[in-house]
Amino acid sequence: MKARLTLGLVALCGLSFLPAIGASQNETKDKDASLRTLTGCLSKGEKAGEYNLVTPEGNTWEIHTKTVKLSEHVGHTVTISGKVWHPDMHGAKEKTKEAVDSDAKEHGHLNATDVAMVSDSCKK
């Protein structure tokens, strides 16, 4: 009887931690995700074929692609989907940055696979 009660309490305590575990896995998944969909203002980059996307939160992404025509969307608000370059390293870098400065903005590199125009201008 005593063992059954103890086992029941251990199981109950274990279940109470599941929401916290799930929340931390979601945060990890977001920063480490290899596929992303981002919305923001698209501008021309420093090099040929390179573009920059600034999200409303102030995060910046360097966008590269060989298949998606982005030049016609410069100055537009767009939604871009693609693959994050080195997602594990990107996630580790961003988590470290957040640990030092909780207001730090995300910066990454994305290989675009799709683009959709949201607006023909960028809100400032």
Image: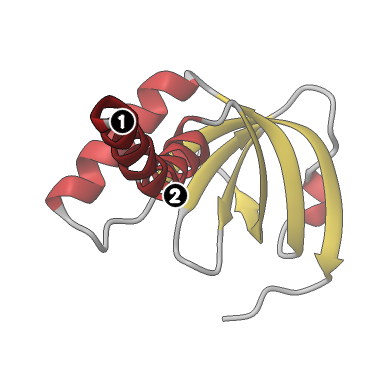
Of residues 122 and 11, the one nearer the viewer is 11
Q: Residue at x 83, y 71 (%)?
A: 120
Q: Where residue 107 sits in the image (x, y, percent)?
A: 41, 44
Q: Where residue 48 sits in the image (x, y, percent)?
A: 63, 31
Relative horizontal placement of residue 42, taking residue 22 as reference (left or right): right
Report, in whole angstroms, how far the alpha carbon at label 2 lies from the one at label 1.
29 Å
Q: Quadrant of the C terminus?
A: bottom right
Q: Quadrant of the N terminus?
A: top left
- Residue with the mark numbered 1: 1
- Tell which residue pokes out farthest to the front in this image: 1
| Mark before the other along the chain sequence, 2 or 1 | 1
Residue 67 against residue 56 in the figure, above or below: above
Residue 114 against residue 117 in the figure, above or below: above
Dot 1 amino acid type: Met
Of residues 83 and 41, the one nearer the viewer is 83
- Tell which residue pokes out farthest to the left in this image: 100
Question: In the rendered structure, are the residues bearing label 2 and label 1 in contact, judged by CB atoms less than 8 Å apart?
Answer: no
Residue 112: image quadrant is: top right
Q: Residue at x 27, y 56 (%)?
A: 104
Q: Residue at x 79, y 46 (%)?
A: 71
- Residue with the mark numbered 2: 19
Disc nearest the viewer among 2 and 1: 1
Say which element carries label 2: helix
